Amino acid sequence: MWSHKAWPGRILPPSLPAKERLRAYSRWCNAVEGNTTFYAIPARDTVATWAQQTGDDFRFVVKVPKVVTHELRLAGVESEMRAFLDALEPLGDRAVLWTQLPGSFGPSDVQALGRFLRRLPAGRRRAVEVRHPEFFTEAGATAKLEGALAAAEAEWVPFDTTVFFRQPPVTPAERETWGMKPRLPRRTRALTDRPIVRYLGRDSAEETAEGWQPWTAVVAGWLREGRSPTVFVHTPGNDDAPALARRFHDDVRALVPDLDPLPEPEPVEPATLF
């Protein structure tokens, strides 16, 4: 996401047209989750504007449509995937195909996942997020999934909600999010040279920052190994998510000083009547 109702005047210039918000967002962060593609395949021309608003090093982690993952469960999806891949073509190799699977997609479905991943075009980076508990708690299920992902050179995307569920919700946004997110163990093993992490904190910035400390060490270790990780920082309301992402980046730079800094955001001028 690069547009959020709380961001104009806070993260983005207050009167910025919607078609220019991605450009402004790209000054805050150098990657984005493409969540809207889960609900509808965008027009190719729309995707072309995304490419035009961002630099060559900006990463898009784009969610595969739910008709493919949740409704058809990766079977008989040739026409849907053809349309999706055609729409994403303007992004080239900057787009990672993010397959987020429902909690009902378990170890018995791994073979279908393997077939799906192997049919994706060569050179397309791919990443998979699973939510079935056995993948995290049963060694056999873990090994089975890792084998299928390794055969397709796909990454396993952990969604770390451990800090969020550490104590009961206290804000309206936390209460709304409480029943929507999965409760799964933290996973920190990377399978490829470009690991992806999704982290959900609290509405308290300090609790969120305290909770991501294990990840700063992990990410710093990946960087020292020559990997190129992407980390997304969320909170229940996401009002300060871009600023928190930059704070996480600073924490990692404290451990890896030669990590490039993020660009400076555009100034956010206060709204006026004239």
Image (spheres, grey):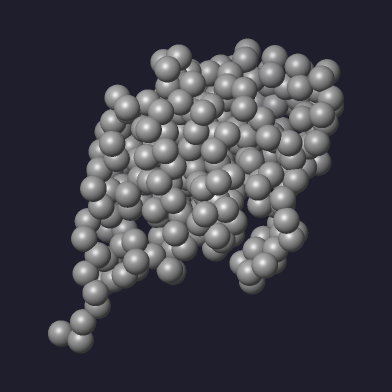
Position in image of residue 102 (x %, y %): 73, 43
Residue 168 visible in image:
yes
Asked if residue 52 is positioned above or below residue 173 in the image, the reply reads above
Examine the rendered structure and indicate whether residue 158 appears above or below residue 13.
above
Q: In the current view of this chain or complex, which residue is farthest to the bottom? A: 273
Q: In this view, does 143 lie to the left or right of 212?
A: right
Please say if 208 is above or below 112. below
Measured as percent of width and height from the top left, residue 164 is found at 66, 52
Residue at 41 percent of width and 60 percent of height: 3
Q: In which quarter of the image is the C terminus?
A: bottom left
Location of residue 7 (image quadrant) = bottom left
Nearer to me, 78 or 49: 49
Which is nearer the eye, 140 or 49?
140
Residue 180 position within the rendered picture, expressed as x and y whole percent measured from the top left: 71, 57
Across and down, in percent, residue 128 comes to 62, 31
The residue shown at (42%, 22%) is: 223
Residue 65 visible: no
